[in-house]
Image (cartoon, rainbow, N blue to C red):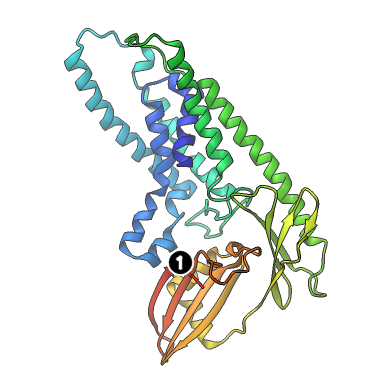
Amino acid sequence: MTHLLTGACLSRAGFNRKTALATLTMVLAAEVPDADILWYFKDPAMGFAHHRGFTHAFIGVPLDAALALGAAWFYWRFWKSRRLTHDREHVWQAWERPRWGLLVVLALVAALSHILLDFTNNYGVRPFFPLSPHWYSWDIVYIIEPVMLTALVIGLVGPALLRLINEEVGSTHIRKPGGGGGAIFAMLCIVALWGVRDYEHRRAVAALESLSYEQEDPLRVSAYPYWINPFEWHGVVETKDFFALVPVRPAEGEVDPQGRMQIRYKPEETPVTMAAKRSYLGRAFLSWAQYPMVEVEEHGDAHVVRMFDLRYVDPNNTSPSRNPRPLGMVVELDRDLNVIDEYPERLTR
């Protein structure tokens, strides 16, 4: 939804006054990269491995734009034929005709906006895939960001409501597309949100780095946002022997003000865990995870290895009935450590 609304706002910021099909093209191009979810229908493990891969990389942007332009072209052919059938004497205005060269540029911009938005959240992107599999993430907004969605909706709906109030009821007069002011307002709100969240993120990281945990100094720290509470962040600290999960309040510079820190000791590396990590899904997961944890369960002659990322484990969640690991990977091995099955799993405790 965020990508669709962003594409619409980018067009309404003024491009829709330059050419027909600007909004349709930019909305489609802003959403096309998520077509990689089709991999999940073939195989869940492949779906995870390919998610935010080629279609979310710079090398895939021309393909994303081409798909959006193709769909817009077919729509234009259909709409134009219907328009000519019903109104052969219509005088076409300049903004009612598509400028395909400009639409190519707009499609590329909208596809790049998808990569930018995904980079800002705490899942990340691989912009240089397949040349480099490295993941990059700004970690300043949650995957679902209510403030951003609200700004986009207001920016799109507000001008339309004002136009309905000011126009005559039943008027058939064709006017140039508007909504530029609202769209620009929405874009400015998003940029301001990024600025505030980036400042909070840096303060949260600095606060985490300034402390020791169970008499151990941090080797690496990260801070991740919540989607509901913008004033508290989820901190993950790695030390030599364990990971610490702690709430952070960057405005006050406080770390774990209510004493809810959780300690997760690093598991011992065994032949079972090593075999699971060498599996197809294990390699894909470890290339993406920032703070991976591994748990092993024995079921008869089989080993069930579960892997999850601590950046998605809420330190405020102490209830065993809730889901502390929202995204996990499961690799099932036989007694000879051969892979029986591998799949992403929504884990519950």
Q: Quadrant of residue 41?
A: bottom left
Query: In this figure, what is the number of numbered marks?
Result: 1
Q: Which residue is mark 1?
A: 346
In this rendering, is residue 150 above or below 126? above
Indicate the secondary structure of the residue bearing disc 1: loop
In this rendering, is residue 78 above or below 33? above
- Amino acid bearing label 1: Arg
Image point 20% across, 21% down: which residue?
82
Q: Position of residue 288 (x, y in %)?
A: 54, 63
In the image, is 229 to the left or to the right of 127?
A: right
Q: Quadrant of residue 92?
A: top left
In this rendering, is residue 253 above or below 267? above
In the image, is 249 to the left or to the right of 287?
A: right
Image point 74% across, 50% down: which residue?
202
In the image, is 257 to the left or to the right of 79?
A: right
Q: Nearer the viewer, residue 229 or 242?
A: 229
Image point 28% across, 26% down: which residue?
76
Image point 48% across, 41% down: which residue?
2
Q: Label 1 crowding class (10 Å Cα cut-off): few <14, some 14-19, many 20+?
A: few
In this rendering, is residue 218 above or below 223? below
Q: Nearer the viewer, residue 157 or 211?
A: 157
Q: Position of residue 171 (x, y in %)?
A: 34, 9
Quarter of the image where the N terminus is located: top left
Q: Position of residue 332 (x, y in %)?
A: 42, 80
